[in-house]
Amino acid sequence: MINEARADALTLRGAAKRAGVSQAAPYRHFRNKDALLAAVAEEGFRAMAEAMERRAGPQRGDPAGRLRALGLAYVEFATRHPAHVRVMFGRVSIDRAAHPGLQEAAAAAYGLLIGAIRDCQAAGVVRAGNPEDLALTAWSAVHGLSMLAVDGQLGERAGRLEPLAQAVTADVVRGLTVG
């Protein structure tokens, strides 16, 4: 349903109808719409983290390569799963504090980026500084590119997303380097 309509248009009643179950059935699993959206967002963060780990895995011995791979995986995940990304980061606000599983999944995904920044710092590739601040810089660039792609704002560049993502992630690493 989130692939077909905005997350704010989702209803438990509509989900029940789509699933072919009684209107009361979703309430056995979700206390309200926010709980359903939190579950969708949690699933998205877990899948995104898995995709990031999978793509960065071969780069274990190359901290800068690992950081770039995490960014590339982020862009790829966002463009393959735009509905999830819109729920994860969209305008429908989900109180993460009310959903510990969502909070944990989001922190784990972001923690991959912070860990990569720390590894780059330890290797002397990325300058000193608060790894969380530097991770926010990297995330902002990659998330911005992802949302431009998801929202169809790249025009003719959309057909060259992989090389564009390669360039953006390389620029991010270059911008965070020592010196």
Image (cartoon, grey):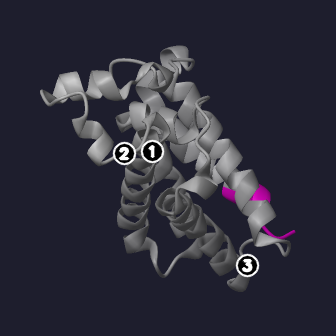
The magenta stretch is 173-179
Is 3 placed left or right of 6 in the picture?
left
- The residue positioned 70% from the left and 85% from the top of the image is 122
Three-letter code for the amino acid on which mark 2 is drawn: Phe
- The residue positioned 68% from the left and 83% from the top of the image is 123
Residue 30 circle label: 2
**Nearest the camera: 148 or 8?**
8
Is the residue under label 2 in contact with that under label 1 (CB below 8 Å)?
A: yes
Q: Position of residue 136 (x, y in %)?
A: 73, 55
Task: Residue under label 1, please give it.
Answer: 35
**Nearest the camera: 80 or 55?**
80
Q: Position of residue 155 (x, y in %)?
A: 53, 14
Q: Is residue 152 above or below residue 12?
A: above
Quadrant of residue 3 within the rendered picture: top left
Q: Is residue 178 magenta?
A: yes
- The residue positioned 60% from the left and 72% from the top of the image is 116
Three-letter code for the amino acid on which mark 3 is drawn: Gln
**Could you give the CA–CA distance between mark 3 and mark 1, rounded to whole angstroms?**
38 Å
- The residue positioned 62% from the left and 57% from the top of the image is 97
Quarter in which the N terminus is drawn: top left
| Residue count near mark 3 (Cα–Cα under 10 Å), binned few <14, some 14–19, many ≥20 | many
Three-letter code for the amino acid on which mark 1 is drawn: Ala
Task: Residue under label 3, please give it.
Answer: 121
